[in-house]
Structure formats: C-alpha cells, structure tokens
Amino acid sequence: MVLHAPDMALRILIVGGGAAGASAAARARKWSQDAEIHMFEAGSMITHAPCGIPYYVGGIVGDPSMLKTYTPSEFSKGRNVNVHVGSRVTRVDLRSRELEVEEAGSTARYGWDRLILATGASPLIPRVEGVGLKGVFTVRLPDGARELRDGLSAAGTVAVIGGGYIGLEMADAARSLGKRVLLFEAMQRVLPTTVDQDVAEVVHEELRANGVELHLSEPLLRLEGRGSVERVITEKGSYPVDAVVLAVGVRPDSALAESVGLRIGETGAVYVNEYMETSEPDVYAAGDLAETTHMVTGKRTWVPLAPPANKMGQVAGANSVSPRSLKFPGVVGTAVTKVFSYYVGRTGLSDEQARGEGIDFESKLIKTRSAAEYYAKYETIYVKLTVERKGGRIIGGQIVSRDKIAAGYLDLMAELVGRGATLDDVFFSDLSYSPATAPVWHPVITAARVLSHGRL
C-alpha cells in the first residue's frame, strides 16, 4: 500500500531526524500549515545531540536520554509533523516519487511531492584487521552511548585512535572514568586538519599534564585479540589495551543518495546549490550529508557540524514549501571543543590550508590575558590571526584558553572572517571592555595590531 497525503496537500518527506531533518520539518511547517510532513528516523531518538556523548561517558550528563531537544511525541504534537522512529528508509524511487520504509515489522511506501535527505554522517572505520573485535567502539548516536560508557567503565586501559575533536573529547572522558588513556594520531599533531602546529603544541601540553599518553606520528596497523581486543599494533610498537575508541573522523552517510544517482560533489558529500537543491528536481539534501561553499575560498567544502546542519535544514525546509525562497550562504568552518580545562577553537583557514590554497599570508600567535592586568582572576589566552598579506583581510583565527570567554572571542573572529574584515576593521571595532572580561586592548585587537607591524 502506498500512503499519500489528502488531495491538494503538499507532501513533504524527510529522511533523518537529527539536526538538519528536524530543522527542515519545523521550518516547512512554519511556512505551511497545510502540508503533510513525515519525518523518518532509523533510531529511537530525534533532535539528538551526538556531540554530547563524550560528556555522558565522562559523567557530566546523567543519562543519554537527555541528549535530545524533543521527544518524538513532543515534536509531533508541537509541530504537527508525523514522526516515524525505528523507521529505516530502504529505497527511494525517483520515477514514482515513493519511499520504501521498514517500520513496525513491515514495509510501507510513502508518496512525496518534495523529498529532503538528512541522513547525516557516520564514523570512518579504519580498514585494518581487528576493528570488529569486541571492545572496539565508535561514537555516533546517543542510542549507543550507554553501551560505550559501560564498555569503557569495565576497561583498565583505553586506546583512542584519532586526535580530532571526538578523539580528544573521548580521551578526556576516559580519564574522567579513571582509565589509563593512550591517544594515537597518525599525523604529527592533534587536531591536524583544524589548527596549526603552534596552537596544537599548547593542547599537547594540556593532554600530557592530564595523564594522556600521547603517541603522535604513529599510524594504526591493526588490532589484535581473541574475541575481544587485547592489543593495538602501530608502526612503532605493540600496546596492551582493554578497549579501543575509533575516532578517526566521519564520512557523509550517502548510501541512499548514491543509490538513486544523486550527484556527489568533489568533497564526497552530496552536491547541493545554495537552495539545498540536489541534482534531482524536488529533492533536497541538508546537514552532514551535504557539501556547501567555503566563504573564504569560494570553493566547495564539507563541514559536518551541528550549527550549519541546523541552518541548512531550515533552508531546505523553507524551499520545500516555497522553492528558492531562502539561500544558504556557506560556512567559514567555525568549531570549538573542550580538552580538559582548555577551550580550543578555530575559524576560517589555518596556515596550512591557506598555504594549500596558494594564498600569500602571514599569521601570529600571541599570548595575553583574559582580564586586565590588575584584575586578580584571569586566565592566559592564546589568540592567532591569519591574514592575507596584501590588504590585510582576515582569513582565519584560532584560540586556546581555560576561560570560556575564548568561545566568545572565537565567534568574533568568525564574524570578521565571514564579513571579509581587514586588520583596520578589527582595530577600529567598537568592542566592549571591562577589567573582568578583557584587557583594555582586547586580545583580538592586539593580535591585529601585531600583524600590522606598527601601522596600527
């Protein structure tokens, strides 16, 4: 049986109930009170927050059920959206405009006028021997968070494979459980695709100071064990472990999109334009599934983070009701994480990325304070700006501090990068001042002054 909406009602089907999917559903409903909207989620939770999983594992969040914004019933009632959980979309038929869905022990088909794909991203699994052993975990959805915490709680020594955001957060969480933690990163620094070596060195010190055994430039060869993982084998050694967390990155969960021949972009994510339209009419993609444009380079990029995913979902939802009514402008790649007591963030291009783009740039990492010199309570704050040498356009920023205000400074830099601001724009920014919140010369302005070589 094919399930259709009533005559004349716009039928919008959304695959995925995470950040992008739920945002798309909410926006579509706001723009149309008449449309019939269905949202399908394979798991048991919608509006879920995977970024909170390390905080549950580390004991900051009491229960994985808290890692959501709405329950399915709350969202369904509040938004007048048909929410289907435990419903896996197995087939998309573009010709008949139907979805095939496995739900409640049977298969149903739903017809659509507009389709939004928001299937997100899934963990990268290294192609090495032993990744299927018991005691080897990935970090994806809150549905699996309890099993992850139970597995790490029972371990004595935990190996974390990968020094990106999730790897660092999981190393922190495992240490909170009192575990011996070995962190393996194939590159010569942690956060290798996001921050530069000088900023990473500050993070290295924090990791080591908190008992993380850091193994840099040490690629994984294989995992060994008889049923359960027992050893990590790298190019440099063999290490006995009780559990392994694979955190080497994520990839777009694009199997469904690829199965119907949607265009895949140069980043490996689904190609969309600024309206979130795919290569197929009336089919949209949003969130971690879709690529977008980098506002600094103008090139295609893929940034699997919750803030842009939510906004991409809003754009897709609006345009599913009123085509080409809302545009997504792109991203500058802003992200922040917490590594033990440090807040570490970045936006725009790193030096390495700028170099790869052939940009003539210069940068400077400065060390200053988060408050006035005479104010007793302060933290050290590291600020780095990267600018085009000609014209002084701000193209990137990085920050590290134990003060939460670092996130606010990062947001300032993100706005400067997104607006194409110059060193002069930064210098003359009318920023707030209080001895408790910054020196009289704001750290971001100080970084700009240093890069002006005395001109400002």
Image: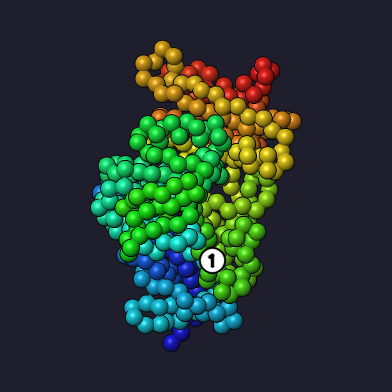
Q: Is residue 324 visible?
A: no
Return the x and y of residue 413 as percentages of the image width and height.
Answer: 56, 34
Query: Where is 52 relative to 399, above or below?
Result: below
Return the x and y of residue 346 as percentages of the image width and height.
Answer: 53, 38
Residue drawn at x 37%, y 66% as measured from the top left? 43
The coloring applied to the image is rainbow
Residue drawn at x 39%, y 73% as measured from the top left? 87
Looking at the rendering, which quadrant does residue 68 occupy? bottom left
Return the residue at label 1. Answer: 254
Return the x and y of residue 97 as percentages of the image width and height.
Answer: 55, 79
Q: Identify which amino acid the numbered label 1 is placed on.
A: Ser
Considering every residue shown, the one lying at the far front of the view is 237
Residue drawn at x 67%, y 30% as measured from the top left? 362
Dot 1 falls on a residue whose secondary structure is loop
Considering every residue shown, the one lying at the far top of the view is 374
Within 10 angstroms of label 1, few (less than 14), some, or many (20 or more) residues? many
448 on left or right of 152 = right
Query: Where is 204 relative to 325, above or below?
Result: above
Return the x and y of residue 77 as percentages of the image width and height.
Answer: 34, 64
Total count of labels: 1
Residue drawn at x 40%, y 52% as measured from the top left? 232
